[in-house]
Image (cartoon, coloured by chain):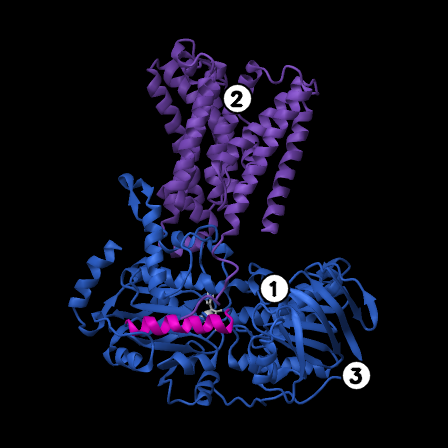
Chain colours: A purple, B blue
């Protein structure tokens, strides 16, 4: 059997891997270029305190972005992450402030609440066959409504739990390395990102998520319990949204029940800019984090330069379209 | 996998004795195959299988049996129920009635996994792979070797295991390569590897060669011989008669959802099989006789596109059928796509009816009366979620508008007409095309372009996956079109088809046209000589 003739050109060297890497590299270069540009043209941009500000601003969107990355790679979408974040913050507020429970219980309750609601979304999508867009659009409103109901539409403050500050503004690391003043919220984002990246690339869970997004029918015919993994995917997304809820409420020292709407779009934007394909089966957490940084560097840089705040929204829109264009362009090339 | 190793021995210990024995012998060769066959007993038997879909009685009282170490061809017209029967045997569908026996014991195959656990696997007509995952990841999806508390995938072992299977199949595929970037032939080998990883004793291949070139087919056959020598029973669905003669031991013929007969492949004449399939004798002439007029309809000069098309010039006349032959990858499809405006060209001129024109997009091409039937119907030819009627009429909707409204009644009437003409097997014209059998989908695409009424028709592999009866019907239609004064280009990998249809044959190799032959006198050897005439050898 000679099979050298079967096909020489393709197969051995997968074109896609290099494309994904390339695209991440492009996003990274864009980020560096933006940093360079603002450092040159915006005085006060490249200061330590401003950098910390940028990181602070990235933490929430970054974590939410990682949450939706799971769902988007699996071929779905989750529009509820923004209001889910708010709902989980309110849950933390109720457990810690209203019930006066210790901090770990509050953290656990927030994450569990997110995971549970995520699983509910997953159930309606997998078992009731409701399209992800619709199911999570519904969940977005449900979470938003519940947050308002539970909190009686009033902010819940964490004044009785001073240790709550540990979740975001405090910089524990600066206690050890005084020169590194990275706030805990940002450290949490990095930890979430690294763990998520490992889960997606190394574990069985990640393999299933990629398989679902790549070809669900093929996965089903391969004997995979598609529904179970789908529900788990949305639960993970909800749970990570819970972490975002903790970070945001820690930074504000309060759970703001009216907050949250619109965060899902920023999160999805970060994912897309980071090169994850909205059609599923392809994507990285690193890309999402870079995408989130690109967005906050832009916002911050334009503000420091004195550009009217609202222009940032316009620029973000342009960036999304350019990012997707680069994606399509690179894929055509390979 | 641990599941099977537990289940199988007890099964083997039960009803049957012979099946567990793997025939151990060297590679290939008739003697080995016969030895395996002699040892062969029924591994799987189907009895009285019934299956209906809404509006379609797909199977009626069908029986079938497969022995260890045999290649059992399953033949029948499009929509005869071949794929459905095999989906029932492999747990994809549940029968409405009937029995499935594995090693003589009745079993219920609740899902594909249940079948796989018994060593029964299928490679579907449409490949089902996860394009973004690697070969190794695809093979072991859902059964990954784990480490670290069963959470992490043991990638190294995964690759090693996949490499071992590929070695056993004697193919060199990189286990880490992305499946989506592979050729169809290689994807198929990955599917086979996947089936083997379940310790398959029964392997169903549904039209595995419909997208392969000759070398790839040879390679697949070598793999099949090897499997056979190891006692694997293979069901082989195909519409290609020569393949049946080459590799099958027995042939089962189905017609209209019914079992017709099972015959030894070697001693049964081809004509008998065809007659059983179509239920009548096929009177088909064997060579093209006519020729085109002298009126030039299309002239292509000096067409270039990267390495795919090199200085191609062609002319096509009114009333003519021009065949373009060549091995896969010779650039035939690329030329068609360039003429149709689907790909940009580097240089070259296209004249239609003597006038130079620039075709920048398929819409331009259609406006100038060029139709192109793509070789890949799923991606380019068919909107699978839409009805038969809408697909047939899609390219001609303009004609069926009145005051901004679609004339539904008229649409329905023409759709009915084509369904009848091409014998499209569908319960009604409102059926979604994804529910049709593979060959019937192809007929729908053909209808679409026949209805469009273009002057120049380019058919790329028009009879892929189409049964003999319908093939003859399509040949007749193409001839009729030419006789009506249309100009037709047929691209085909099947030499008999090119010879059967073409008035003139252009042969391509490595992007160039290496010669032109008179369709009435050319032989297969003539074509093959030109098709392998590489630039540096000339
Ligand atoms: N899921 C389904 N829903 C409705 N009808 C179906 C379905 N699957 C198959 N059919 C119908 O059952 C009949 C048998 O189809 P099947 O796919 O088994 O044919 P086949 O013999 O494999 O044909 P081909 O050679 O064209 O692949 C066809 O009429 C087809 O339209
Ligand atoms: Mg079929």
> Residue at coordinates 46% horizontally, 83% vertically from top-left?
B277
Is A85 or B182 nearer to us in this picture?
A: B182
Cα–Cα gap, marks 2 and 3: 75 Å
> Range of the magenta residues?
B212-230
Up/down of B289 relative to B407, above or below:
below
- Tell me which secondary structure the magenta stretch mostly adopts: helix
Which quadrant of the structure image shows residue B423?
Answer: bottom right
Is the residue indicated by label 2 positioned so its CB lies within 8 Å of ligand 1? Answer: no
> Residue at coordinates 34% horizontally, 76% vertically from top-left?
B28
Secondary structure found at label 1: helix
Extreme-right residue of the structure: B355
Secondary structure found at label 2: helix
- In this rendering, the label closer to the viewer, 1 or 3: 3
Residue that label 1 marks: B381
Q: Chain of mark 2?
A: A
Up/down of A318 relative to B497, above or below:
above
> Residue at coordinates 60% horizontally, 25% vertically from top-left?
A297
Residue that label 2 marks: A55
Is the residue indicated by label 1 positioned so its CB lies within 8 Å of ligand 1? Answer: no
Return the mark for residue B294: 3
């Amino acid at each position: 059997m000679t099979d050298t003739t079967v096909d020489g050109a393709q197969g051995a060297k997968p074109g896609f891997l290099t494309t994904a890497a390339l695209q991440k590299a492009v996003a990274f270069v864009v980020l560096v270029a933006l940093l360079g540009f603002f450092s040159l043209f915006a005085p006060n941009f490249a200061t330590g305190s401003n950098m910390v500000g940028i990181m602070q601003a990235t933490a929430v969107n970054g974590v939410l972005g990682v949450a939706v990355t799971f769902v988007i790679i699996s071929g779905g979408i989750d529009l509820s992450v923004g209001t889910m974040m708010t709902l989980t913050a309110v849950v933390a507020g109720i457990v810690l402030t209203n019930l006066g429970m210790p901090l770990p219980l509050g953290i656990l309750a927030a994450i569990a609440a997110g995971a549970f609601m995520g699983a509910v979304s997953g159930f309606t999508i997998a078992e009731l066959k409701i399209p992800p867009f619709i199911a999570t659009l519904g969940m977005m409103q449900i979470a938003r409504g519940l947050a308002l109901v539970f909190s009686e539409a009033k902010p819940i403050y964490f004044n009785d739990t001073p240790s709550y500050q540990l979740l975001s503004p405090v910089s524990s690391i600066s206690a050890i390395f005084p020169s590194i003043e990275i706030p805990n919220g940002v450290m949490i984002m990095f930890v979430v990102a690294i763990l998520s990246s490992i889960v997606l690339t190394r574990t069985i869970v990640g393999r299933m998520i990629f398989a679902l997004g790549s070809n669900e029918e093929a996965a089903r015919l391969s004997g995979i319990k598609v529904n179970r993994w789908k529900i788990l995917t949305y639960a993970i997304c909800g749970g990570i949204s819970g972490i975002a809820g903790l970070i945001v409420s820690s930074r504000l020292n309060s759970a703001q029940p009216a907050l949250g709407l619109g965060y899902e779009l920023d999160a999805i934007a970060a994912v897309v800019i980071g090169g994850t394909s909205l059609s599923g089966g392809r994507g990285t957490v690193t890309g999402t984090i870079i995408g989130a940084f690109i967005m906050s560097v832009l916002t911050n840089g334009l503000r420091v330069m004195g550009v009217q705040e609202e222009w940032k929204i316009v620029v973000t829109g342009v960036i999304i379209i350019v990012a997707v264009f680069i994606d399509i362009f690179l894929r055509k090339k390979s | 996998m641990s599941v099977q190793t537990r289940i199988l021995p007890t099964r083997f210990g039960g009803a049957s004795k012979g099946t567990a024995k793997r025939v151990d012998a060297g590679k290939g060769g008739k003697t080995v195959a016969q030895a395996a066959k002699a040892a062969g007993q029924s591994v799987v038997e189907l009895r009285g299988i019934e299956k209906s879909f809404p509006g379609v009685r797909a199977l009626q009282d069908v029986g079938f049996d497969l022995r260890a170490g045999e290649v059992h061809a399953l033949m029948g017209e499009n929509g005869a129920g071949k794929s459905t029967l095999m989906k029932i045997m492999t747990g994809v569908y549940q029968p409405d009635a009937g029995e499935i026996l594995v090693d003589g014991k009745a079993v219920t195959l609740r899902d594909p996994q249940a079948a796989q656990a018994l060593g029964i696997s299928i490679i579907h007509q449409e490949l089902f792979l996860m394009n973004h995952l690697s070969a190794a990841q695809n093979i072991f999806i859902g059964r990954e070797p784990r480490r670290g508390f069963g959470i992490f995938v043991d990638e190294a072992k995964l690759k090693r295991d996949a490499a071992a299977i590929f070695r056993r199949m004697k193919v060199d595929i990189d286990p880490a390569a992305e499946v989506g970037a592979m050729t169809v032939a290689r994807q198929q080998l990955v599917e086979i590897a996947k089936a083997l990883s379940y310790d398959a004793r029964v392997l169903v291949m549904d039209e595995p060669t419909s997208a392969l070139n000759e070398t790839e087919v040879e390679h697949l056959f070598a793999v099949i011989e090897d499997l056979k020598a190891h006692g694997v029973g293979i069901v082989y669905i195909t519409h290609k008669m020569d393949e049946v003669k080459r590799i099958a031991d027995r042939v089962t013929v189905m017609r209209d959802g019914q079992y017709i007969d099972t015959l030894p492949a070697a001693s049964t004449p081809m004509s008998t099989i065809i007659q059983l399939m179509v239920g009548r004798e096929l009177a088909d002439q064997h060579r093209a006789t006519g020729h085109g007029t002298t009126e030039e309809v299309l002239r292509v000069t000096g067409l270039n596109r990267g390495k795919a098309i090199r200085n191609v010039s062609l002319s096509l006349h009114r009333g003519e059928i021009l065949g373009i032959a060549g091995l896969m990858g010779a650039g035939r499809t690329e030329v068609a796509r360039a003429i149709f405006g689907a790909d940009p060209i580097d240089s070259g001129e296209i004249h239609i009816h003597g006038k130079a024109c620039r075709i920048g997009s398929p819409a331009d091409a259609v406006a100038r009366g060029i139709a192109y039937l793509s070789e890949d119907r799923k991606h380019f030819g068919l909107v699978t979620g839409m009805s038969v009627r809408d697909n047939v009429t899609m390219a001609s909707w303009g004609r069926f508008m009145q005051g901004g409204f679609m004339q539904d009644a008229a649409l329905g009437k023409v759709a009915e007409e084509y369904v009848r003409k091409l014998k499209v097997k569908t319960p009604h014209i409102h059926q979604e095309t994804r529910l049709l059998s593979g060959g019937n989908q192809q007929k729908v695409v053909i209808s679409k372009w026949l209805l469009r009424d273009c002057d120049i028709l380019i058919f790329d592999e028009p009879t892929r996956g189409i049964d003999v009866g319908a093939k003859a019907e399509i040949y007749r239609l193409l001839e009729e079109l030419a006789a009506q004064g249309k100009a037709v280009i047929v691209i085909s990998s099947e030499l008999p088809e090119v010879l059967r249809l073409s008035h003139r044959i252009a042969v391509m190799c490595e992007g160039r046209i290496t010669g032109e032959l008179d369709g009435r006198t050319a032989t297969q050897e003539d074509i093959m000589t030109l098709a392998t005439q590489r630039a540096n050898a000339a």
